[in-house]
Amino acid sequence: MSLSAALKASASALDAERARLEVAVSNIANAESTRGADGNPYRRRDVVLAPNTVETFDAALGRAGAIGVQVTNIVEDQAPFRKRYEPGHPDADAEGFVQVPNVDVPEEMVDMVGAARAYQANITAINVIRDTVQKSLELGK
């Protein structure tokens, strides 16, 4: 695998982890949004990732493929809304229940920590590649 392919793979992971962080932040920010533009509570969103070949295997050149990642979609979680008994709320039904988003804040926090750690790991990988190239250039002097 070439160093540029490894850099591209790590860069694609940085983009994917940034998207995961943004979606988790949006989910947390809307965890109490009982009415959106469509009149329904906010629906939790999730990022769908897929592999993305950065460099393909080429036996003649002796290169192995590097696999990056790409965001293919951001989907709404179709889990049912939670219900909370709050008869004084303007969005309460006849029985006094309010539909609230299907967002579990602790779960979103775990997702955020995971995405942040993966982001840091890819930054570290990029720095190792950069240092390797720098050392190689110093040896070539």
Image (spheres, rainbow, N blue to C red):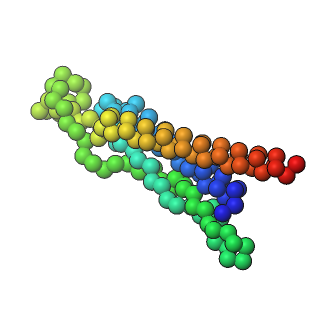
From the viewer's perspective, is residue 100 above or below residue 54? above
Residue 101, image quadrant: top left
The residue sitting at 15% across, 25% down in the picture is 87
Q: Position of residue 73 (x, y in %)?
A: 48, 53
The residue sitting at 52% across, 61% down in the picture is 51
Question: Which image quarter holds the N terminus?
Answer: bottom right
Residue 103, image quadrant: top left
Q: Position of residue 45 (x, y in %)?
A: 39, 45
Residue 106 in view (yes/no): yes
Q: Camera-side residue: 116 or 124? A: 124
Furthest residue in direction right, as rendered: 141
Furthest residue in direction bottom, as rendered: 60
Report the label total.
Answer: 0
Q: Camera-side residue: 10 or 98? A: 10
In this rendering, would 42 be left or right of 17? left
The residue sitting at 61% across, 55% down in the picture is 9
Residue 34, image quadrant: top left
Q: Camera-side residue: 60 or 17? A: 60
